[in-house]
Image: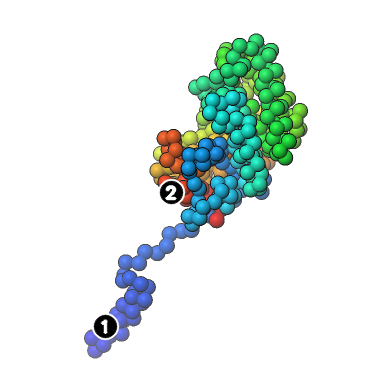
Amino acid sequence: MKNVLWAILVIPILITSCSKGGGSNVVPPGPTYTPPTVSSSFAKGADVSWVTQMESSGYKFFDKSGNPQDLFTVLKGLGFNSVRLRAWVNPSDGWCNTADVVSKAIRAKNAGLKIMIDFHYADSWADPGKQPKPAAWSALAFPDLVTALSNYTVSTLNTLKTNGITPDWVQIGNEVDDGILWEDGRASTHMNNFAALIQAGYQAVKSVSAMIKVIVHVSNGFDKAHFEYLFDGLKSNGAHWDIIGMSLYPSAANYLTLDAQCYSNMSDMVTRYGTPVMICEVGMPASDPADSRAFLTDIITRNNSLPNGNGLGVFYWEPEAYNWQNYSLGAFDNTGKPTIALDAFGGN
């Protein structure tokens, strides 16, 4: 009887285990990832300014299934609705000059993506550690420098307009933590000049289209004290803006702390100046896409949760960069396919 009972109880279990294809070490599936829910107007963006240069070097891009596609089509399928393009005045190699910006903007528009133009007001990189004047502007007196900035802004935007493109957003400077066009526009020594340059850019943009939103963009979105210092200085010197832009580049170890500090700063900016906030640059090391996805999910959720729709969007900086110029914060794998980090933007 014991043997009969053993057979009755055990044999069905063995049959069930075998029917599931491979013995008793079957691992149940993990939880399905759900991207954050955001408002319909929320900008889910990527700065992809390197794309034409990468393509000229033979780089290809693929969707998640490995099918070759135009990068802008890949982004659209991943849930992105916006791109950011940097503009340099007269770069030595031509990349990111006006013609290159226009070519990328046309592709973005054809893919159904909104566009942000990021004016560096330099011939190459401008950021917190350097804000060099374009070579052609280097000897100008300050009033003429203001005019040059204004004329260049209008000319670039009119060229885009001629090609059927009016950007949704324009940055007057890139990560302007200590102003632009040094030394004349260095904030720590010439806040009034910095404000005059920002105001000239603001007016130039509005002269082309009053619908374009003007952004002043500063790094380290967690640094509330610096943001208050800079925007208090701009405000007291008569400068205007529509949106405060931030960068945030945390690590897997500190992103929750920095995200919380950034949220506090975003809330302060909305209350203090009455203007909304956009995260214009984010990135995390590409070595662990799961950590990056968790960070993106958190910062997108926090920005979108600002009261009264004052969180306008999040842009990943150069996610398409893989095996490229030693940049380690991309979100595509070494075969040119997007990683799970970008699932946070809500695509398929």
- The answer to whether 243 is drawn above or below residue 347 in the figure is above
> In which quarter of the view is residue 192 placed?
top right
> In which quarter of the view is residue 198 placed?
top right
The residue tagged 1 is 6
- Give the residue type at disc 1: Trp
Counting from the top left corner in percent of width and height, residue 159 is at 70, 32
Q: Which quadrant: the N terminus? A: bottom left
**Disc 1 and disc 2 in contact, CB within 8 angstroms:** no
Counting from the top left corner in percent of width and height, residue 164 is at 72, 40
- Give the residue type at disc 2: Thr
Counting from the top left corner in percent of width and height, residue 189 is at 57, 12
Closer to the camera in the image, 335 or 316? 335
Residue drawn at the location 26% of the way across and 87% of the way down: 4
User: Can residue 262 be seen in the rendering of this structure?
Assistant: no
Residue drawn at the location 63% of the way across and 44% of the way down: 107
Counting from the top left corner in percent of width and height, residue 317 is at 52, 38
User: Can residue 211 be seen in the rendering of this structure?
Assistant: yes
Count the marks.
2
The residue tagged 2 is 335
- The answer to whether 115 is drawn above or below residue 290 in the figure is above
State the SS at label 1: helix
Q: Earlier in the sequence, mark 1 or mark 2?
A: 1
Closer to the camera in the image, 106 or 274? 106
